[in-house]
Structures are given as C-alpha cells and as structure tokens.
Amino acid sequence: MAHQIEAKPIEQRFARGWHCVGLAADFKDGKPHRIDAFGTRLVAFQGEDGALNVLDAWCPHMGGDLSMGAVEGNTVACPFHGWRYGADGKAAEIPYCKRVPPKAKVRTWHVQEENRLLFVWHDPEGNPPDPQQPIPHYKACFSDNWSPMTLTSWVINTNNRELVDNIADMAHFDVVHGAPPVYFANLFEGHKATQLMVGSSARLSGESRLLSRATYHGPANLFVEMVGAFDGLTIRSMLITCNTPIDLNSFRLFYGVLVERIPGLSDEQNQAIAAQYVEQAQAALLEDVAIWDNKVRIDNPVLCENDGPIYAARRWYQQFYVDVAQIEPDMRESRRFELDFGLDDKPALHHLD
Ligand code: FES
Ligand SMILES: [Fe+2]
C-alpha cells in the first residue's frame, strides 16, 4: 500500500526564543518602524532616552497602526487620534482627555541588541527571556580582522519548519546545492543543535574542501562558521542566519555575512570576496525556495539509511513549541549522529559558541 502522507494542521503558535528583527542601527533614527512578526504587527522605536522599545503596533483605542505614527519624547503617538504610548506599553497621554483608561495598554516586548542586530523575545506563555537560551556574542562582529557584516533579508513563503529541517537534511546538499558531503554529523543538546559538514562546493570552495559548522542557538538563530576557498585562497566566513515568522505560512530570513580579512589584500578586495559570498548564499537560498514552493508539509517522511536524523531534529525543535512545563527530556537530551562517506581526518563534533 502506498505511504499515506500525514500533515496535521499547523498549530497557531510561534516558537519561544530570541528572534532577529534587523540591524539595530536601522531602528535608531527617531522614527517608528513596522515589524510584521508572530502573526501580528509590532512597532520599534528609539525614544529620547536612547532606549530601543518594541510594542504591539495595533492601538487598543480604535485599532490604529502605531508604526505609522511619530516618536514624541519617549513615546510613540498613534496616527489616528494621537494617544501616546511609553516604553511600559501604557498610554502616557491622550491629547483631548485628562483621564487615561487603565485598559489603554499594549503588549511590550523584551529586546536585546547583540552582534549589531536587534532581537525580540517571543514567548507564548509571556515569560521573560530564558537566561539558559542566550544569544551568543561573536567577537568577529566587532573585530577589524573581519569585514563589516552585510545583512540581507528575504520573505520566504513557507512555514519556518521547512528551513529548520535543513539542519539534518544531508541528502539535499548535493542534489539541490551541488555540494556533496563526504562527512555529515549532528549534535542535539539542550537548546542547541549543530550540523557539521565536510564536502565541496564549486561555488564556495572551488576544488578545495568546504568545512561548515552550524549551530542553532534556540529555534531561530543559526550561527555558521565556514572555511572554503576562492581563487586558491582559504576563506573563513561567519554567517548569521535568523528566521523570524511573519505568520504560519511565511517567515523573514535574515542573512548576515562576515568574511575574515585576508592579510595582503586591500579592503576593496576583501569586500569583493564578502559580496561574492552574499551572492552565493542568495543563490543557494533560491535553490531551497524552489523546493519549498513545490512541496507539501509532511509529518511522517519515509527515510532511508544515510538520510540525516530528520525526526531527531524535529523532536529537538518541538521543545520551543510547547509550554516549558511540557518539555519532555528527549527533546533536550544529548544525541549525536554521524554519516561518514570515507573521510579520514574528521573534525570534532561540538557546538559553535
Ligand atoms: S486608534 Fe490610536 S489613538 Fe485612536
Ligand atoms: Fe538548503
């Protein structure tokens, strides 16, 4: 009998964790900024005091969009009737009324600036950020030895689980990206999931070997270290790949790239290499998108020997979609997987942190 593909309706829920919303500097211009995420709209603004605030954007008065308003002092003013909301989410002032109704309050979001990016903490239970699930700090983002980060973002029209499946999907790298692995390993542990891959890619390593170590810190932020080659030169790069759900059927993918400066090359030459990496990364992403645009969600994939641990990856990912009290030990336990196609000098399997 043919295999029956199963796909439960996607639950109306978004992952617990830090999610990137863009370059922190972009929000520091004294204007309100619109962020479509988690099935709703948020507004980010910097008040006079310098603090970056993120609030729900839909005004509880009559539904105006705060991100279309204006920053006044430490508040954001609604464009509809001028109610002004402060960092605590409360209406601080109504221009035509002395008494502010106690219900005039919007949800506030925890924010953190790290690696020059701005992150918001999403938690369906409304708890504050979990210190056990931090955003790692990368010195490369602040070092003169590395090119400044270029950040690009794209809207991808599928559920973000399709992207996260990639962490364990060995077999698509050759067919979709032309980068066959000779060694592929995964380590799942707590809130981290790592993929270690040795292979080659005409685009990112030429004739040489490509090594990539990628670690999810939580559900949405993948930090990747890559050693490849370009024109016979060894290239070390860092990629920060962040997915932030817009709704259940789309997410924004942020793609930050840093390339270690090659001594002896000019700034222009180093920047050209970084630019080339961004281009290649975008090309690779479009290859994934072409698949996602023409596939179905499948909860019960039929796997074969040498497939990566798709079920283990999904079990790990599931911890971010249940209440903290419902997290089962096997979602966070340490699990290692290895696929070896004949590599003698295997790199050590550990997280990138
Ligand atoms: S809808 Fe925002 S002030 Fe009226
Ligand atoms: Fe891919």
Image: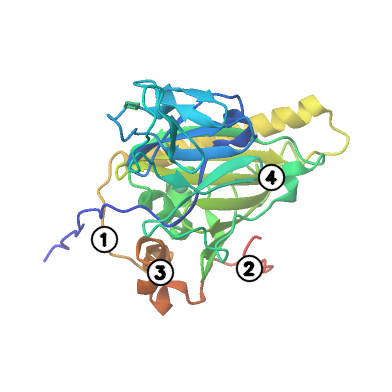
Across and down, in percent, residue 165 comes to 40, 56
| Quadrant (top left, top right, bottom left, bottom right) of the C terminus | bottom right
Count neighbours of disc 3 (C-alpha within 10 A) and say few if under 14, some if 14 to 19, many if 20 or more. few
- Front residue of this view, candidates 168 and 158: 158
Mark 1, secondary structure of its residue: loop
Q: Earlier in the sequence, mark 4 or mark 2?
A: 4
Number of marks present in the image shown: 4
Across and down, in percent, residue 307 comes to 41, 64
Q: Amino acid at mark 1?
A: Asp
> Residue 240 is drawn in which quadrant?
top right
Across and down, in percent, residue 266 comes to 84, 28
| Disc marking residue 237 | 4
Residue with the mark numbered 2: 350
Residue with the mark numbered 3: 324
- Front residue of this view, candidates 204 and 244: 244
Q: Amino acid at mark 4?
A: Ser
